[in-house]
Amino acid sequence: QKEVEQDPGPLSVPEGAIVSLNCTYSNSAFQYFMWYRQYSRKGPELLMYTYSSGNKEDGRFTAQVDKSSKYISLFIRDSQPSDSATYLCAMSGNNRLAFGKGNQVVVIP
Amino acid sequence: DSGVTQTPKHLITATGQRVTLRCSPRSGDLSVYWYQQSLDQGLQFLIQYYNGEERAKGNILERFSAQQFPDLHSELNLSSLELGDSALYFCASSPDGGRNTEAFFGQGTRLTVV
């Protein structure tokens, strides 16, 4: 089992729809959970950062962490064409920092 | 701008050659990570340095090596290059040893081996 699993997609949605992305992980030592956004193979940029289980909201973005299920999610509300990018989950703990493969999202106007 | 600087931005070289990629971390960050991203692959972790010492090793080939200097910049050396080494190479930095904190990425070096 890979340390971090993320379905690479791609995922196409119409503008205004809710985008739902998720990752699973196997390492119980992970305590910090992140989502990165990568445009056109540029450097990934940090989008959301959460600690432990629960929800965190930032504008149209909501990150959820369920440590008991080892499952994290990112929701994008009212998606815009500018949200078209690759989204990577990442998690860290106990000196480990691991990334998912990334999920390509296309928001169609 | 993440504050992480990578040079060069693009590199084209021939098979069998050797290249060096450079990374300057954000001011104050002690840890540097190197990642490889091929066309069909996600981010593949290569190696991590913390304050000049190797901290963790991922899927780094023996033909590849890295180091972190006293001023905390890092270099990734790729030798005996093969066509399959063509990829984006990203450097990331974090304040400490990756101990539960986020990392910030540079814009990458696009390596093309012909």
Image (tube, rainbow, N blue to C red):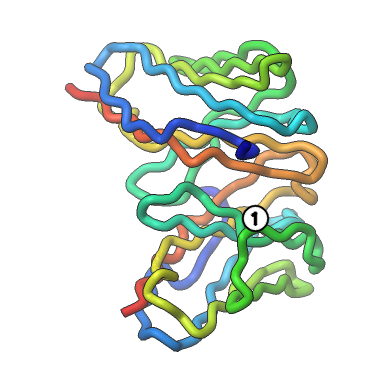
Whether B59 is drawn above or below B64: the answer is above
**Local secondary structure at mark 1:** loop
Whether A89 is drawn above or below B39: the answer is above
Tell me the chain of label 1: B
Which residue is depicted at the point 74% across and 74% down?
B69
Whether A16 is drawn above or below B114: the answer is above
Sort mark 1 into few (<14), some (14-19) or many (20+) by Cα contacts within 10 Å: many
Which residue is depicted at the point 74% across and 62% down?
B49
Depth order, front residue of B3/B7: B7
Give the labeled residue for mark 1. Answer: B26
Which residue is depicted at the point 69% across and 44% down?
A97
Q: Residue furthest front?
A: A1
Along the horizontal axis of the image, is A88 left or right of B75? left
Q: Residue A2's image quarter?
A: top right
- Measured as percent of width and height from the top left, residue B8 is found at 45, 72
Which residue is depicted at the point 36% across and 55% down?
B39
Depth order, front residue of A1/B18: A1
Q: Amino acid at mark 1?
A: Arg
Along the horizontal axis of the image, is A108 left or right of A22? left
**How many marks are shown on the rendered structure?**
1
Depth order, front residue of B59/A89: B59
Rendered-image quadrant of the C terminus of chain A: top left
Q: Residue B14's image quarter?
A: bottom left
- Measured as percent of width and height from the top left, residue B59 is found at 61, 60
